[in-house]
Image (tube, rainbow, N blue to C red):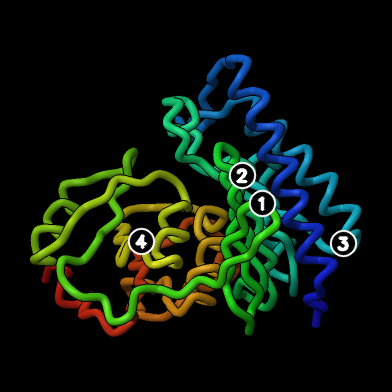
Amino acid sequence: MIKLTTELRETAIAIAQEAGQAIMQVYSNGFDVTLKDDDSPVTAADLAADRVIQQGLRQLTPDLPILSEESPLVPWEQRQHWGAYWLVDPLDGTRDFVKRNGEFSVNIALIYQGAPAFGVVQSPVTGIVWHAMRGELAYRRQGVHDTVLRTRTPATAPLRVAASRSHRSAETNALLARMGDIETVVQGSSLKFCRIAEGGLDVYPRLGPTSEWDTAAGQCVLHAAGGAVLSVGTGKPFRYNRRPTLLNGDFMALGDTSLPWRDWLSD
């Protein structure tokens, strides 16, 4: 069992903050955009943040592997044996970064036996950090002050529903129509999980692929605040590194886990 210590938490938060600073240097100075093999964009900011995080985590936990969106893919034959590892998205919301709307984040999660044991989400533009350890509370850190997070429970109408700025399908629009009395709020990146954790939003439905590094840190924060990230297929919380693919299935992120989310799905 890996030890979840104050030193680990504070060092990982500092690493995320340093990565955020590296991102903002690129953000301020201008950048080029290239496309990866899957047509997703990548910039110098993604790569600069990845270098900061990789170096910092290797110093913090030399024996733990790191799985990052910007690193070469580790074969399933190798990573299926990992008991604990870091799961990283150095710049979540690159499309929002390119659009310069400020809605992007740094995601760092520590996965232990398939579930997030620690997660930190950092907003480079605001400097705000959301963090949580398994079995403890979730926090929002602004400056040096931590505020305890709790989801809005019970969630009453109108439900405040997060809508992705970059990934909005006809299927998602139909689901939103079935939800009844709602207020949609456009929000980018894993900041959606954090907004639910602090009670500003109630639901984030995602019908369509995401990658495991997109959700792990936000899931850890949301679960610690009283919510959940549930697989639409199984109704259970997401598990990580359990299959050869790193793609997630459809999910519901909920602040109030008693909401009738299955009723919103089509037949």
Q: Which residue is mark 4?
A: 200
Residue lying at 21% horizontally and 66% vertically, measured from the top left: 159
Cα distance between the residues tagged 3 and 1:
26 Å
Residue at screen point 87% across, 53% down: 58
**What SS does tag 3 mark?**
loop
Graded by Cα atoms within 10 Å as few (under 14), some (14 to 19) or many (20 or more), the crowding at tag 3 reads few
**On residue 186, which mark appears?**
none
The image shows residue 30 at horizontal and vertical percentages of 58, 15
Q: Which mark is residue 143?
A: 1
Residues at marks 4 and 2, CA–CA distance in whole angstroms: 18 Å
Amino acid found under the numbered disc labelled 4 = Gly
Res 201 → quadrant: bottom left
Q: Earlier in the sequence, mark 4 or mark 2?
A: 2
**CB under 8 Å between callouts 4 and 2?**
no
Residue appearing at x 22%, y 46% in the figure: 169
Q: Quadrant of the N terminus?
A: bottom right
Which residue type does callout 1 highlight? Gly
Q: Which residue is mark 3?
A: 61
* Image: 97 above or below 221: above
Amino acid type, label 3: Thr
Q: Nearer the viewer, mark 3 or mark 1?
A: 1
- Left or right, residue 157 beside residue 217: left
Tell me which corner region of the image, top left, top right, bottom left or bottom right, holds residue 29.
Answer: top right
